[in-house]
Image: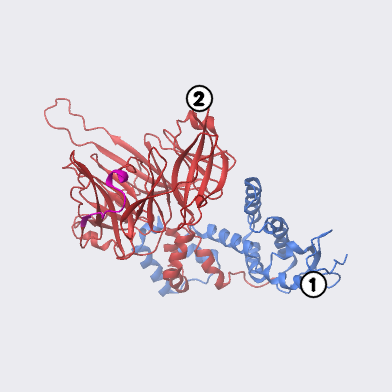
Amino acid sequence: MAAPESGDGNNGAARMVTLISSDNTRFEVEAAAASLSQTLQLTILDGGGGGGDGIPLPNVDSATLSKVLEYCIKHAPAAANGGAPNATAVDRAELERFDNEFVNIDQSVLYSLIMAAHNLEIEGLQSLVAKKVADMIKGKSPMEIRRTLGFPDPTPEEQAEMNAHMLEYGWAYE
Amino acid sequence: MTATVPSIPDDLIPDILLRLPAAAVVRSRAVCKQWRDLVDDAGFLVEHHRRRPPAPLLCFRRDDPPLADPDHTTTTSPRKFRVRLDAVDLRAGETNKIFSFAAPARKDHWRWGPLRIGYTPGSHYERDRLSATYLVNPARRRWSRTQSGAGCGGVLGFYLHRPSGEFRALCHVAKSYLANDFRILTLPPAREVQRRILGGPHTAQQLMGAVPTESPPALVAGNLHWLRQGDGGILVFDTVAETARLMRPPPPVDGAHVAAQTLLEIDGKLTMTTVTVAGTVNLLTAAELWVLRDYERDDDDSWARQLGPVPLPADEIARLGGGAVAVVSMEGDVVVRCAECMLQCDAMGRVRGRYEMEGRRFVGVPHLFKESLVPHAHVDGREVLTGFEHIQSPPFFLDIYQDDD
């Protein structure tokens, strides 16, 4: 299973790498998919993650990692096209559908994904989850936003400021 | 395994807030001190504006009949018209109301600027004369009212004059039967300068060729661009020098009947939509999007075909009396102005949305609107109270939440 050590191994079978979650589950994926992570890309370019080694990811649990890899595997072909200027409308629509479905998840899973995307520096996933959070809060009041995001209850001063803001910018609260 | 309370890392908050619509950004100021500091930052606001998805505008109009006067003894009260302006969220397939109001029906002139909207209602008393000009930024609910541009027939274009930082309007002055004249109005309320535009190699008659289009101009590289009726040429108004010139359009396509349709600014580039017209009944079968690659160049290679041919639902368009077609994104979203509605189609030629309003006439506005929360001293609401002591808001804000009965 060891991949040939040649530099740009685009010949033959795709090179595979192994990732190890914080709870010691091993995931084997194509190097191209894992390389969507800026953090992993350097290690993989250096030949890491192949064979029995595996790359440990102490900040990502297995449930989150499998979700992250689902995203990477789906997006790797388009990313390989270099931002896909030639991608057909069908491809794009299909990816869009996948993305919408992908973030249709529990808030706790979403937050784990946000952290993982951030730690692994997966740009597309970062913006996808950021967009999802934006969609979650865009119709909410400041108080509802605080609750949604798990902020502590406002102090009396903060509460007073929230009320004053609402009076001044009433139109934004319709 | 993960026992920690899930929360969002601080450095991801900007990325989230940058994706909110303008009103939600304003609300988010009240969430906490950190968010307020973030959102009040000038750099944040500029980036927020840059990222807002361009939204095609929909304008609906209804003319109310004059009040009944069966005896014909007195003059009837003036007819009113109601105007409502919406922006289409192409991704969500929703419309968001920008404003609506009712006003006496007279000569009324509408022109849209890129970030802000200039509203110039016609005078109740004198035809061909503007009673007032409003500068409005709907995203911030800020406005300014300026005095009339006496003698000006209509605002053709509206722009930020960079050297002075002022908003200015290019106006057409109908000088009775003699000649056409074009003037520039400086719009800040404090002072108003009116002067003729300086020569330039092209005459008022050539500028006039741009006037019949209902389209607001496309603002790219600080300049205003119109598609000239008839010859498909492009007229440019340089907003710094304040002179007019002609620009080379995309090269003609051999062997097909292709018509230039719309000029739009997309992603900071000047684009032109062309359509293929087929058959004896002039079916609009496909659209192409051309992009001006390098603004400074002026040769045969300056235009490139970005998209196309994008298929159009030709029969549906014909059935709905469709006319003007505009490709409104680099991804191939298309809007088609029809007799009573606007159609939204995707890059595969499928109809994705149909926007209309019962009892209202659809007035097409081939223009893309991007919300901006960036403040400008000349569009700042406070001035309006002088001269408007008796009301709190100009009409387009007064009515904004009323039902359009």
Figure check: B335 above or below B224: above
Q: Residue B243, position in %: x, y?
A: 31, 55
Chain A colour? blue
The reply to whether residue B263 is visible in this rendering is: yes
Q: Seen in the image, is B40 located left or right of residue A50? A: left
Q: Seen in the image, is A124 located left or right of residue B183? A: right
Q: Residue B142's quadrant in the figure?
A: bottom left
Quarter placement of the N terminus of chain B: bottom right
Chain B colour? red
- The answer for how far apart the CA atoms under marks 1 and 2 are is 64 Å
At label 1, the amino acid type is Gly
At label 2, the amino acid type is Thr
Q: Residue B387, position in %: x, y?
A: 18, 57
Q: Secondary structure at mark 2?
A: loop
Q: What residue is shown at x 82% (from left), y 60% (from top)?
A: A11
State the extent of the magenta-drawn residues as a range: B194-207
Q: Residue B46, position in %: x, y?
A: 44, 65
Mark 1 surroundings: few (<14), some (14-19) or many (≥20) residues within 10 A = some
Q: Chain of mark 2?
A: B
Which one is nearer the viewer's eye here, B136 or A12?
A: A12
Q: Chain of mark 1?
A: A
Figure check: B22 above or below A152: above
Mark 2 surroundings: few (<14), some (14-19) or many (≥20) residues within 10 A = few
Q: Seen in the image, is B386 located left or right of residue B59? A: left
Is B379 a magenta residue?
no
- Label 2 belongs to which residue? B280
- Label 1 belongs to which residue? A47
Contact between labelled residues 2 and 1, with CB atoms less than 8 Å apart: no
Q: Secondary structure at mark 1?
A: loop
Which one is nearer the viewer's eye here, B26 or B109?
A: B109
